[in-house]
Amino acid sequence: MKPVLLMVDDDEDICKQMKWGLSQTYEILLASAREQAVERVREAKPDVILLDLGLPPHPNSTEEGLQTLGEILSITPHAKIIVITGQGEKENALEAIGRGAYDFLNKPVDMDTLRVILVRAFHVAKLERDYRNMQAHLHDDGFEGMLGTSRQMQDVFTSIRKVSTTNAPVLLLGESGTGKEMTALAIHRRSPRRDGPFVAINCTAIPETLLESELFGHEKGAFTGAHMLRKGRIETAGGGTLFLDEIGELPRSIQVKLLRFLQEQSLVRVGGREEIPIDTRIIAATSANLETNIRSGEFREDLYYRLAVVVIRIPPLREREGDVGLLARLLLKRFAEEHKKSVTGFNPKALRAIEAHDWPGNVRELENRIKRAVIMAEGRQVTADDLELGAGAGVFRGATLKEARESLERDMVRRSLTRNKGKISRAAEELGVSRPTLYELMDKLGMKRDDDREPKAE
């Protein structure tokens, strides 16, 4: 998608000349008067604007142009406004700079000079926007405590907003450490059940012999050691939300009872006979491939479809474009304050190592490495060695040749797609392979395709 450039000038010949020279790089919007320029700014919020100071109804003075400058900056104060002025009007240009203009150009405009100034203006605008985003995150807890400005995480936040208003079961898919429990908690907090309990249980953390009683409860005397009636987690979560983590590890015998509860919204405690109606919303999560488990007979297909009414995929950190650097800085600030350390940032080598690392443990790994680095750092800046990401540290450690090759391929493909804004054709050309070959490689590496970002044929 091309950056938007607004040109405010009543001279049609100049506008045609500049549009012809710039339209391949920028999406050009035109305005010939103050009111029209203000309307365009309100609609498009362009980062960069070219503004002629001599506008109607007073084209021979700067009065209208300077007023336009002020009105634009009142709407979008961070816009980069490049003023165009006559050769003998340097004092007007300086006045415009004093009122907030970014730069100025003399007439007649030299297109090569203009191109250089525009590239710099758009670059500065992006840097300032990224900085504002980072500062905004420093002063709040993000989205229900979840941080991320990437398109992938914004999609997750959108799904949370939509599903939280319903009582539908939700299945969260994602690698270990991606934040599935935080996602479940965000859904609960935004739901009408927010005042009810949020009960979490990890299906792998409880022995199979105790898991049925833990989930469904038991009556007094139901088995040896059952000295009193005990409510299970499902019952405890009545009026609220039950989060079942690693649902793929649930034993088949208990899958049957959970399916029955989802169908009838009632349960029978172990050793009991009474049907107890329970109003509990179920959110399940897994890092396993449930479809593979269904084919192997380890997971019931009917239970899968009961749980997967809505499916939300939590992306791994390596797929979250631009988030790793932002999260690293935020976590460093948090842990430095928590441990009363005078660490202020990362040195350049550490930043490069953070961006280059594949983060197999995702956000959890990032948190652990940065917390340790802040504690162990001797200077004011964290180094790659503090993070244990120095040259050769942890690179393919314990990996087979096949795993190392796949890790390198995945990293190269991910970086190429990021550089080319998800355009498959451009990434394939950069990597020296055909588009079908790149698709095959992404499928082999388990990388999500994003076909909707590929430009459509005219």
Image (spheres, helix red, strand yellow):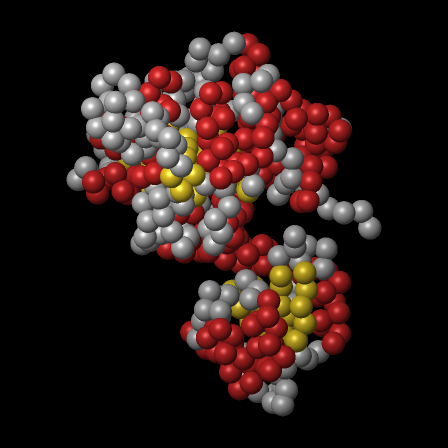
Q: Residue at horizontal 38%, vertical 39%? A: 276
Q: Position of residue 145 (x, y in %)?
A: 35, 47
Out of 31 and 321, give the one closest to the viewer: 321
The reply to whether residue 181 is visible in this rendering is no
Out of 456 and 26, give the one closest to the viewer: 456
Q: Residue at horizontal 28%, vertical 43%? A: 333
Does residue 145 sit above or below 385 in this rendering? below
Residue lying farthest to the bottom in this orientation: 57
Does residue 272 sit above or below 14 in this rendering? above
Residue lying farthest to the right in this orientation: 458
Among the 4 quarters of the image, the one containing residue 53 = bottom right
Out of 148 and 131, give the one closest to the viewer: 148
Q: Residue at horizontal 70%, vertical 25%? A: 440
Left or right: residue 439 compared with residue 124: right
Q: Position of residue 214 (x, y in %)?
A: 33, 27
Residue lying farthest to the left in this orientation: 340
Does residue 163 sit above or below 398 in this rendering? below
Among the 4 quarters of the image, the one containing residue 376 = top left
Among the 4 quarters of the image, the one containing residue 223 = top left
Q: Residue at horizontal 66%, vertical 79%? A: 32
Q: Position of residue 45 (x, y in %)?
A: 55, 66
The reply to whether residue 394 is visible in this rendering is yes
Q: Position of residue 240 (x, y in %)?
A: 36, 46
The mark total stands at 0
Does residue 225 sit above or below 53 in this rendering? above
